[in-house]
Image (spheres, coloured by chain):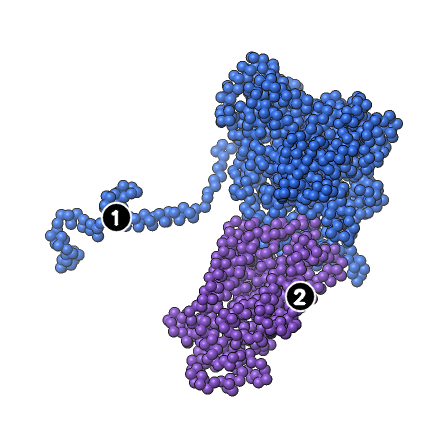
């Protein structure tokens, strides 16, 4: 404009240079009206927004929003500012500790990574638990990370702090004590001597205190028959084992320990000089228990006959050993006479156990044991076992007192009797009558929620403790993580309420140094390092308990009936969930029960003939009632169960345990009857079952129950034939060729693999696998196997890498394919652990389009999750069907609310194992992370890995050592030696004839029967 | 381009059509306003497509856990649908290529729509390849693409990789063949076009076709060459699809009879699908003179022959299962016929083996309604064949503990519906915007052109048509 000679003016205002125009000259559009003019200001920031600013802001906004959307969520890994001395990232620390839960015991090693406990293994230094532990102990690490536990103390249902709780509670307690009010501490069996000492301190402060001990699944009868103690039982010494309803391999007292002992007697060898003897195991029971499934001879009785079965056995044994028999109705039971004969024949190496909690029945059993010389050999009353200390009479008395209103204060020390005692409802009604109530339970469960105070105990992995499982055998519990929530271990609470220093750690140490170790800090450190302290040799006593046989027989004759035709209930404990104390543990909820293969529920199990008689089918919802208590649950048809008997498991029907447990199944505790002063898990009077007309699916991981006479899958023989010819019962498929018959595996198109370094392999002994499934939990914990929940199990999508196949025998002929689908009424059972067979000619490897599953140079069939595109071809082509597909994203998804979707629950994840995303295939990796770690360790020390140094999680956790893992290239390894012997004996590959050449071999099952035909 | 045709042969085009009539009859669908029937049909297809697309989207979003599959049955409706659609896609190539080589002139009026159907069916099949993957966003990993992972390559041993090659080759060749055949007809439409848009678009896709003798000669050569390339594909595609099963170890899958059996089944179902579509098209578009009873009958004969081959294959499988003495294979077949999925097996047997035998009667094979009904029955049967092969083999294989049942969810069904929506939407778009009958080739087979060519029409139409 300046250079222009002419001046153009745009309007009269410019020409006249009015002041108002000059003021706005920089505005291109002058004083154009804007929308905001009328109001004078913008709605947003109070200043007028210009049109161009709007565009600017819009542009900025769009850019900012889209940039923000592009950013992926950031997860920070925060390095240690001050690194704890013992914590090396990626290096695991192991601590010796003790697992105990209501009388369950295991000395354990806890694996921690970066300060988080992630895995429990057995501590072999313990001569009590010998490194074996149950599935529940394995699963207990997940309970540590249960987000639904109480996060701090509660007073009157509201969160409080510890000082307030202590102040209010002790004030009320002192007031109650001052008035001479009765105080009770109610707990389950306590293994800890120091805890008992703490309770004694508390009692000293409040002298009206009495400690009432009960057990959810008690052994009161057994202790009553042995003068108040539980005798030590050793099945490993037995040649003849008779069990009358004791599920000692699954749920009775200390199943993992018993299974290990039992397995010792069940090992056989195919070599010429191999062990060719086995114990003979008779089982008489009402339900088909895990133990019954492993027995050589088995027959059933109705619950109402239980006492008389014991009596009949006594009489049969008495007759053979020349003792006077006692009067009573006799029960004709298959194999009972034979059992008596064998018991007497193997006198001194015989044992009879009974699962009944009726003291009178146990007395008869004790008398029978005396007759067969069990005391001093298989049973030792010189060694008191502390697993069950419950006193049913005392507990019943407590509930009566509470109902009468004569109790002033009660402390429930990690006990939940409202749920797990048959008189729980009565107690719940009586609780308001108790002036002061407190629970130390970890959550506001059925009992704690009714108490005025909750002083949540810490998880055992956060606590100091000790245990004396058997007299003179000690072990220590040490914290492996600081308390996650504001919990305080109950012992500290008791000390605080007793007015002492609440530091239980030093209390424990000083008690040990003074009374147990009788040594100083060094001894303490050593004991803490080892986890166990076993100063004394076992005291063996050949003493027998004195039993008034006639009196007991009379009592039994009164309580039992030989000819009852009533419908009856048998209450039993499941192998997985147990008494329900850890019911909110998704691993345990998804644990397939060894025999029924059902999870996420309890059910009314009835036999097929009974179902036919009652016109019921699997899945029908029925109402079962007895004693005025009613439950509605689905029917499960269970072969091998006594007729007219409904079996219902305890441990379910929790209402206040948490999301995974609440509403799963029904509570069966109220069905338990009081017989001869004890809680006996049978109900024989007035039981009714009514169909509701509705149905409910039961989540079973196996729905086809027979092996369809497929010898290539399960191979078995009887001991008699095996002794004559170790190859008897072996199935050797052959193919006819022009040159005559050949082994099916001799004809091949495959080139094979060369393993120059290691050749990992596994041998599974079907003879000692009890089906207990501890390996399933151990595997899930080690390998971050997700829990999928009830509906997805019904959809047949459970993710377990290790499964235990359970087959019932069938009465049908081999040609009768339809008949073979139906199990016998009293079937023989076989358990077969099934996992990736790591085939050398792997069908999965050839079909993967993207090479996501390949063969390693050490014989592993390995899965590359990152590469998998999820065609599932490999799973279809897997003859063993061991591949598992991630149908959904199981972690971080609200639909799968099983501790895997929150930060706390995910602390249990093993950082060495990839968490698999949606859409990829997964399967057993032979714990490749352990193999690599073991090799690395050996390499650092410039040596080869030593046999046994590397263990798969399943092999390590097998209580019976049924699984042998190792390097088949190492001639000195256990697996090589085993295969050397069994190659021409019991070892076989499942469906060998398709020539996939698995690296997993099975050892044929041998039953100790006289002939194959016997049922 | 006319070949010499014996005067005693039946006419392939009836109704005394002239070249002009042919052009007019075929082009009027393309040039005119969409008919009411078309709008309805297209509208319904779109609705089905939209519902299916929702189901498919949900499947992709949540994961294929929304289907009814499980740890034992890893494939069910997904691969059943895939094989079914690929099978349907066989007729197009067979009609265009094999019948061209065998000089079966009757094919000319149906090859265009058969080829279109092939392409759409293969697209539907491809949608299931993608949908069935756990991680479909990584589908390209199944291609041997250079990558940054070093020497990471696809597994050339895997039949799924062969599938990828087979299907993509088949799709490319079919597409090329179809498009090449379209060029002269597109040029005809271009020449008749009255609007700018159609002139532009048809002009663009007709690739500057001039209709000179040289172009026609090249067209013929190309047809022959592509027919030569396609003919082995007719056999290879379903052979390779069958190898997905045949090379496995699963009893009921591991069968050497599969390649011929699958090819026969594919032609069987493909012809049935062509039959279904043509019977509708000829009525809707009034093409009765081009797609005559003779065509229908010919197709029915092919259906009967291939159906019988399939039937023999079923019986052979059974015989071999017994004769081989393999416990698992025997069981697999007994289980098919008498196990929990017996109904699927007998559905398959009835639809595929028994129903086509009805065509032995001339009255039945020339009856339009019966032909239409049976053409659908055949495809129902063929769907069940694949279901039976896949699901009944998987659900009870070697280890009885893993035996399981499969039942579909609404997303199994919804994703199947998606493929129908896709297929029909594409087919109706094709029917509206492209000539459904190959005008150029039909004109070539109209016999006695000079003898019965009406004189008055000749003058008017020769200029524009040729």
Query: In which quadrant will I find the C terminus of chain A?
Result: top right
Instruction: Using the rendered image of the protein, determine whether residue B376 is visible from the camera's viewpoint.
Output: yes
Farthest residue to the right: give it: A322
Q: Residue at x 55, y 38 (%)?
A: A899
Disc 2 element = helix
Number of marks: 2
Give the residue drawn at x 52%, y 71%.
B282
What distance separates the C-alpha of mark 1 from that of mark 2? 79 Å
Q: Is residue A343 above or below residue B179?
A: above
Specify whether B42 is left or right of A942. Answer: left
Can you see residue A769? no
Residue A736 placed where, x, y %?
Answer: 79, 59
Which residue position is annotated with label 1? A35
| Chain letter tied to blue | A
Q: Disc 2 designates what residue?
A: B354
Label 2: chain letter: B
Give the chain coloured purple: B
């Amino acid at each position: 404009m300046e250079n222009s000679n002419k001046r153009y003016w745009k309007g009269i205002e410019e020409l006249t240079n009015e002041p108002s125009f000059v003021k706005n000259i920089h505005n291109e559009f002058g004083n154009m009206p804007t929308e905001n003019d009328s109001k004078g200001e913008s709605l947003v920031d109070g200043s007028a927004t210009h049109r161009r600013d709007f565009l600017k802001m819009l542009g900025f906004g769009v850019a900012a929003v889209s940039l923000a959307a592009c950013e992926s969520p950031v997860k920070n890994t925060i390095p240690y500012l001050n690194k704890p001395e013992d914590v090396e990232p990626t290096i695991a620390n192991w601590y010796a500790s003790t697992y105990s839960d209501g009388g369950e015991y295991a000395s354990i090693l806890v694996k921690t990574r970066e300060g988080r406990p992630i895995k429990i293994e057995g501590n072999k230094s313990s001569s009590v638990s010998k490194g074996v532990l149950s599935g529940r102990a394995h699963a207990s690490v997940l309970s540590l990370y249960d987000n639904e536990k109480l996060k701090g103390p509660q007073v009157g249902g509201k969160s409080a702090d510890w000082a307030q709780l202590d102040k209010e509670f002790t004030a009320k307690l002192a007031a109650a004590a001052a008035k001479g009010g009765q105080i009770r501490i109610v707990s389950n069996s306590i293994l800890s001597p120091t805890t008992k000492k703490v309770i004694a301190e508390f009692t000293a402060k409040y002298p009206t205190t009495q400690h009432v001990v009960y057990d959810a699944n008690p052994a009161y009868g057994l202790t009553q028959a042995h003068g108040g103690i539980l005798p030590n039982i050793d099945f490993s010494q037995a040649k003849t084992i008779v069990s009358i309803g004791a599920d000692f391999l699954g749920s009775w007292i200390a199943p993992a320990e018993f299974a290990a002992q039992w397995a010792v007697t069940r090992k056989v060898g195919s070599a010429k000089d191999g062990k060719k003897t086995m114990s003979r195991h008779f089982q008489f029971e009402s339900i088909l228990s895990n133990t019954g499934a492993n027995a050589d001879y088995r027959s059933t009785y109705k619950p109402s006959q239980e006492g008389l079965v014991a009596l009949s056995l006594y009489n049969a044994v008495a007759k053979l050993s020349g003792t006077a028999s006692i009067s009573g109705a006799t029960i004709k039971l298959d194999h009972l006479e034979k059992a008596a004969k064998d018991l007497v024949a193997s006198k001194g190496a015989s044992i009879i156990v009974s699962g009944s909690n009726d003291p009178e029945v146990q007395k008869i059993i004790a008398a029978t044991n005396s007759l067969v010389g069990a005391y001093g050999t298989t049973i030792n009353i010189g060694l008191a076992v502390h697993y069950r200390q419950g006193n049913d009479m005392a507990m019943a008395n407590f509930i009566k007192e509470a109902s009468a209103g004569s109790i002033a204060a009660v402390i429930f020390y990690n006990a939940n009797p409202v749920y797990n005692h048959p008189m729980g409802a009565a107690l719940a009604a009586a609780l308001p009558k108790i002036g002061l109530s407190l629970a130390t339970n970890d959550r506001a469960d059925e009992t704690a929620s009714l108490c005025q105070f909750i002083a949540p105990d810490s998880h055992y992995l956060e606590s100091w403790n000790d245990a004396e499982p058997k007299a003179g055998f000690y072990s220590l519990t040490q914290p492996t993580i600081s308390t996650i929530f504001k919990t305080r271990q109950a012992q500290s609470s008791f000390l605080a309420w007793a007015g002492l220093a609440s530091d239980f750690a030093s209390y424990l140490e000083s008690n040990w140094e003074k009374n147990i170790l009788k040594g100083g800090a060094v001894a303490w450190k050593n004991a803490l390092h080892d986890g166990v302290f076993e100063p004394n040799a076992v005291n063996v006593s050949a003493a027998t308990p004195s039993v008034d046989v006639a009196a007991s027989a009379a009592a039994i004759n009164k309580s039992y009936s030989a000819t009852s035709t009533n419908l009856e209930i048998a209450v039993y404990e499941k192998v997985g969930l147990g008494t329900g104390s850890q019911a909110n543990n998704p691993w345990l909820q998804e644990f397939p029960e060894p025999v029924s293969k059902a999870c996420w529920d309890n059910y009314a199990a009835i036999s097929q003939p009974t179902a036919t008689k009652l016109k019921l089918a699997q899945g029908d919802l029925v109402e079962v009632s007895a004693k005025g208590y009613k439950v509605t649950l689905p029917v499960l048809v269970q072969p091998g169960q006594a007729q007219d008997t409904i079996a219902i498991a305890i441990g379910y029907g929790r209402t206040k345990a948490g999301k995974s447990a609440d509403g799963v199944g029904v509570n069966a505790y109220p069905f338990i009857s009081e017989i001869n002063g004890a809680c006996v898990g049978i109900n024989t009077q007035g039981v009714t079952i009514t169909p509701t007309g509705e149905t409910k699916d039961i989540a079973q991981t196996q729905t086809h129950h027979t092996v369809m006479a497929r010898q290539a899958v399960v191979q078995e023989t009887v001991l008699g034939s095996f002794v004559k010819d170790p190859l008897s019962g072996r199935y050797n498929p052959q193919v006819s060729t022009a040159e005559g018959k050949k082994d099916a595996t001799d004809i091949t198109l495959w080139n094979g693999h060369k393993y120059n370094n290691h050749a990992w392999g596994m041998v599974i002994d079907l003879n000692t696998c009890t089906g207990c499934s501890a390996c399933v939990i151990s595997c899930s914990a080690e390998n971050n196997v997700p829990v999928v929940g009830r509906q997805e199990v019904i959809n047949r999508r459970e993710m377990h890498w290790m499964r235990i196949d359970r087959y019932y025998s069938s009465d049908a002929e081999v040609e009768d394919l339809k008949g073979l689908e139906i199990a016998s009424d009293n079937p023989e059972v076989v358990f077969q652990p099934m996992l990736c067979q790591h085939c050398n000619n792997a069908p999965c490897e050839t079909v993967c389009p993207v090479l996501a599953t390949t063969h390693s140079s050490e014989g592993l069939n390995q899965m590359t999750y990152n590469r998998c595109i999820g065609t599932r071809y490999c799973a279809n082509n897997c003859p063993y069907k061991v591949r598992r597909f991630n149908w959904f994203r199981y972690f971080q998804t609200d639909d799968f609310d099983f501790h895997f979707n929150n930060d706390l629950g995910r602390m249990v994840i093993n950082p060495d194992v990839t968490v698999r995303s949606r859409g990829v295939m997964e399967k057993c990796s032979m714990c490749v992370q352990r193999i690599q770690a073991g090799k690395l360790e050996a390499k650092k020390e410039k040596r080869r890995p030593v046999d046994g140094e590397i263990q798969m999680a399943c092999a390590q956790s097998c209580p019976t050592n049924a699984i042998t893992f190792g390097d088949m290239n190492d001639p000195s390894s256990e697996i090589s030696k085993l295969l050397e012997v069994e190659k021409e004996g019991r070892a076989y590959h499942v469906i060998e004839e398709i020539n996939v050449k698995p690296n997993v071999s099975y050892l044929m099952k041998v039953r100790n029967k006289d002939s194959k035909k016997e049922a | 381009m006319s070949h010499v045709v014996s005067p005693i042969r039946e006419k392939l085009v009836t109704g005394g059509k002239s070249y002009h009539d042919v052009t007019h009859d075929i082009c009027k669908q393309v040039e005119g306003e969409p008919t009411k029937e078309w709008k309805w049909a297209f509208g319904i297809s779109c609705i089905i497509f939209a519902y299916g697309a929702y189901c498919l989207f949900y499947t992709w979003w949540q994961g294929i856990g929304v289907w009814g599959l499980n740890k034992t049955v890893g494939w069910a409706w997904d691969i059943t649908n895939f094989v079914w659609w690929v099978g349907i896609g066989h007729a197009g190539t067979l009609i265009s290529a094999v019948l061209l080589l065998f000089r079966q002139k009757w094919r000319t009026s149906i090859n265009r729509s058969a080829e279109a159907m092939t392409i759409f069916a293969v697209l539907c099949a491809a949608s299931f390849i993608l949908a069935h993957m756990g991680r479909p966003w990584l589908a390209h990993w199944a291609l041997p693409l250079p990558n940054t992972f070093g020497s990471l390559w696809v597994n050339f041993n895997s039949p799924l990789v062969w599938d990828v090659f087979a299907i993509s080759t088949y799709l490319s060749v079919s597409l090329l063949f179809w498009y090449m055949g379209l060029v002269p007809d597109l040029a005809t439409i271009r020449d008749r076009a009255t609007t700018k848009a159609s002139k532009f678009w048809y002009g663009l896709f007709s690739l500057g076709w001039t209709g000179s003798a040289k172009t026609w000669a090249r067209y013929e050569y190309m047809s022959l060459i592509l027919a030569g390339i396609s003919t082995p594909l007719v056999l290879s595609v379903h052979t390779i699809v069958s190898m997905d099963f045949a090379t496995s170890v699963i009893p009921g899958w591991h069968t050497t009879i599969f390649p011929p059996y699958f090819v026969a089944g594919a032609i069987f179902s493909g012809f049935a699908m062509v039959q279904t579509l043509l019977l509708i098209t000829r009525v809707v578009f009034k093409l009765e003179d081009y797609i005559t009873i003779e065509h229908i009958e010919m197709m029915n004969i092919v259906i009967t022959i291939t159906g019988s081959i399939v039937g023999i294959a079923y019986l052979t499988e059974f015989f071999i299962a017994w004769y081989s003495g393999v416990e698992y294979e025997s069981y697999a077949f007994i289980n098919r016929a008498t196990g929990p999925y017996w109904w699927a097996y007998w559905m398959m047997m009835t639809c595929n083996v028994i129903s086509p035998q009805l065509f032995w009667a001339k009255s039945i094979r020339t009856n339009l309604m019966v032909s239409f009904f049976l053409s659908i029955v055949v495809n129902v049967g063929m769907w069940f064949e694949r279901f039976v092969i896949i699901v009944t083999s998987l659900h009870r294989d070697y280890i009885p503990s893993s035996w399981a049942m499969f039942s579909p969810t609404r997303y199994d069904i919804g994703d199947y519906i998606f493929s129908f929506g896709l297929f029909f939407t594409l087919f109706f778009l094709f029917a509206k915007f492209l000539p459904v009958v190959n005008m150029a080739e039909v004109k070539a087979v109209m016999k006695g052109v000079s003898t019965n060519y009406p004189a008055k029409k000749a003058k008017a139409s020769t200029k524009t048509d040729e």
